[in-house]
Amino acid sequence: MIIDSHVHLWKTQNGRVDGRPVFSLENGKSNFGGEVRQMMPPYMLRGENTAEMLLSNMDYAGVSGAVVTQEEIDGNQDAYLLLAKERCPDRLKICSLYEEGKPFALDGFDGVKLCAGRFLTQDLTKHAAVFEAASEAGKFLFIELADGDRQTGSLREMIAQYPDLRIVIGHFGMVTREGWHEQIRLARNKNVFVESGGITWLFNSEFYPFPSALRAIREAAALCGVEKLMWGSDYPRTMVAITYKMSFDFVVKSGELTEKEKSAFLFENAASFFGFSGLKEPQRIRNMLED
């Protein structure tokens, strides 16, 4: 059983990066602030990154559930994610997008996403309203911090102020950046977890089977406990270099973690944190390359 704690969906990509527009082109490409980048696999022909495509990839790879987060570079996808959750309520948890200085939604969502590293006001205590609202509503807060320890102090203050709020730190604390351990140490707090979405991107130059990523997982486990770590793929952007299954297969086949630790990292921790229940393992279909 596997849960992906970090995927993205959109029907129409319409975001911004550093004040410049980001929008889909064709064959998986996007205009990324004036530069054409391969944002998705080339088979995503019309720039649509849909729930149907995700669920098909999940079924093939053997992933039971997924958490749909958001990113400002894709634009606000609240409306589409509500439709996706309606289509498949048991397998998907969804986040609304908190945008600095704008109203944010909680109704119908499981959590709220903060792209905190992109905020103009980096001090997270100045964004207390979203922490308070999520805490009162029993939602989780999904946050991606600025590199290193630039925001860990203000997040620590918010954790102390809202100790029952479930918080997940994204991108494995930006593990390849200096000071990443400070983000991981925040997971020593009761309701703070870390997910690994994008870890194959951050170690992309090394490529599969990502031995440094595995060592980083082991290092993080020593800092906060493996019970606070969850696997994420960062689908579909990481799929421009690897297959969906490869994004977790390097963990499954590794000798760095015990079988018990792998089960916790790939499934059990996320099932508990996000509140998944009743998930089923997708049916295994033998592919054409297998004997």
Image (tube, helix red, strand yellow):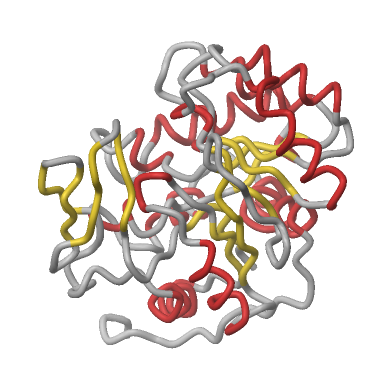
Whole-percent x and y of residue 45?
18, 74
Rendered image quadrant of residue 135: top right
Judged left or right of residue 142, residue 24 is: left
User: Given the current orientation, which residue lies at the most extreme front position?
Assistant: 102
Judged left or right of residue 198, residue 78 is: right
Whole-percent x and y of residue 191?
81, 37
Q: Nearer the viewer, residue 273 or 116?
A: 116
What's the residue at 46%, 22% (across, down)? Answer: 120
What's the residue at 20%, 45% (across, down)? Answer: 32
What's the residue at 50%, 84% (across, down)? Answer: 284
116 up-or-down from 78: above or below: above
Screen quadrant of the N terminus: bottom right
Judged left or right of residue 164, residue 146 is: left
Whole-percent x and y of residue 6?
52, 52
Q: Nearer the viewer, residue 148 or 48?
A: 48
Rendered image quadrant of residue 28: bottom left
Rendered image quadrant of residue 184: top right
Whole-percent x and y of residue 146?
48, 22
What's the residue at 58%, 24% (across, down)? Answer: 219
